[in-house]
Amino acid sequence: MYAFDYKKVASLEDAQKVFESADDGTFMAGGMTLIPTLKQRLASPTDVIDLDGIDELRGINVDSHSVTIGAMTCHADVAASSDVKKAIPALAHLASLIGDPQVRNRGTIGGSIANNDPAADYPGALVGLGATVHTTKKTVSADDFFTGMFETALEENELVTKVSFPIPEKAAYQKFPNPASRYAVVGAFVAKTSDGIRVAITGAGPTVFRVPEMEKELTGSFTVDAISDIAVPTHELNSDLHATAEYRAHLIGVMAKRAVADCG
Amino acid sequence: MEDMLEDTVLVNLRINGKLHELEIPAHKSLLDLLRDDLNMTGTHMGCMTGHCGACTVSIDGRVAKSCITLAATLGRAKITTIEGLTQDDGELSPVQQAFWDEAGFQCAFCAPGMLMCTTELLDANPDPSDAEIETALAGNLCRCTGYQSLRRAVKAAAKLKQNTREAAE
C-alpha cells in the first residue's frame, strides 16, 4: 500500500470540501473493496476520506410504503433488521448473502452501489424493486443509476446518501454464488410491484440489467412455466474463469425461475 | 524522507481490555499494528487481501478482517484478538477448549479466524445448525480442508458452553 493522508469527516459538506482540496482524493465507506485495491497497489490516492463519522448516513427507516436505508448502513444491519425482514424479506435475505460475516459487518450499501461491481448483489435489489438512489446532487432511479461495469450516474465529488425501496407485493432473490468469494455468478431478483413485474439480473453482464421478455410473460401469468422457454442471448454476458457466457445464460433462467417460485 | 512525511493519526484502542494510546501511520492495517508494533502474533497474516480470514479479530463486538481494516480509522474501538479469548484465570475459553478436544484444526493457521467467528456465533446463537455454522465460518479458509473437524468442534463448543452455563446455574 502506498502512503496517503487520512481524513475523517463528520458531515457531507466537510467530505466534499476535503475532496475538493485534495490532489487525488477518494471516499471510503466500509473499505471492503477500497482497502484490498490499495493493498494491491491498484490505486494510489493522495487522500482517503473516511465517511464513517457522518451519522446522518446511517440507519434504516421503514414506513407503510417504503424502506429507506442510509448509505453507510452495513449489510449485517440490513440482514438483521426486523423491520426490513417484515417489509421486504427478500431485501434482508439478499443482504445476508453478501460476502461473509466479516465483510457484512463493515461493507455498506452506499459503498457497494457506488462501486457497482458486476457481481455485487445490491444492484439486483435496487433495479428489481425499482428503488430510488438519493445523492448529494440528485435523486435518480436505480434503472438510470447503474450505467456500466464499475460505472454509475455519480459524478466526481458526489456521494450516495440513501436508497429508498418501494415495498413490493412480493419479491424474491435467488443467487448462484461463487463458492469462494460468494459474489454472484448470477443473481436474479424478481418482484411484483405496484408498477408491474420486474426481473433484474446481476453477476451475468457488465452491470445489472432487466429481462423485459420475462417481465412481459410474468405479467400475463406469474408462474415458473411462463418463463421456462425464455433464453437470454449470450453475446453481452460475462465470460471468465468462473463461468462461460453460455453457462451464465443458463443460470439466468434457473435463478429467475427459482425466484418466481420463491415469491410463492 | 518518506517516513517523515507520513500522515499519522492518534487512536485510543482498548485491545483485550488494555488501553493503548498509539500514533498510527494512516495506511497501517490493524493486522500490522497488532503483529509488528504490539507483538501480538496470534492473529495470523494469510492472504493480506481479505479473502482467507486468518486475520479475523472482533471490533466493537463484531468480527472483522484486520488485514483490510485501517488501524487509523478505529478511534476508540474495543478490539478482541485471539489472545483475548483466554479466560482471566488463564484457562482456555470453552470454544478454545472444544477446538483442542476435537482437534478442530490441523496446521492451525486458520485457527484465530475460526475461533473468533465461532465465539461470535455462539454468543448470538447457542445451538447453531450445520447451515448456520457454515454461514458463520464462510469468511475463513482452511487449506488443510478440515471443515468436518471444524464443524464438529463448533458443535462441541456449543455443548461445552451449555454445560458450563448449566453448571453455573
Image (spheres, coloured by chain):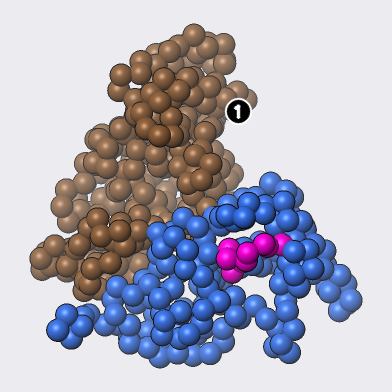
Q: Is residue B128 left or right of residue A220?
A: right
- Tell whether position A159 is magenta: no
| Residue A67 % position (x, y) | 45, 45
Amino acid type, mark 1: Asp
Question: For mark 1, what is the residue?
Answer: A262
Mark 1 residue crowding within 10 angstroms, few (<14) / some (14–19) / many (20+): some
Q: Is residue A14 left or right of residue B145?
A: left
**What's drawn in magenta, residue-wise?**
B104-113
Shade of chain A as shown in the rendered figure: brown
Point 72% across, 76% down: residue: B93
Shade of chain B as shown in the rendered figure: blue
Point 84% across, 74% down: residue: B164
Q: Quadrant of the N terminus of chain A?
A: bottom left
Q: Secondary structure at mark 1?
A: helix
Secondary structure mostly seen in magenta is loop
**In the rendered image of this protein, does residue B101 appear above or below residue A146?**
below
| Residue B100 % position (x, y) | 75, 70
Q: Quadrant of the C terminus of chain A?
A: top right
Point 46% across, 55% down: residue: B51
Report whether residue B77 is seen.
yes
Q: Nearer the viewer, residue A57 or A79?
A: A79
- Tell whether position B110 is magenta: yes
| Residue A35 % position (x, y) | 33, 61
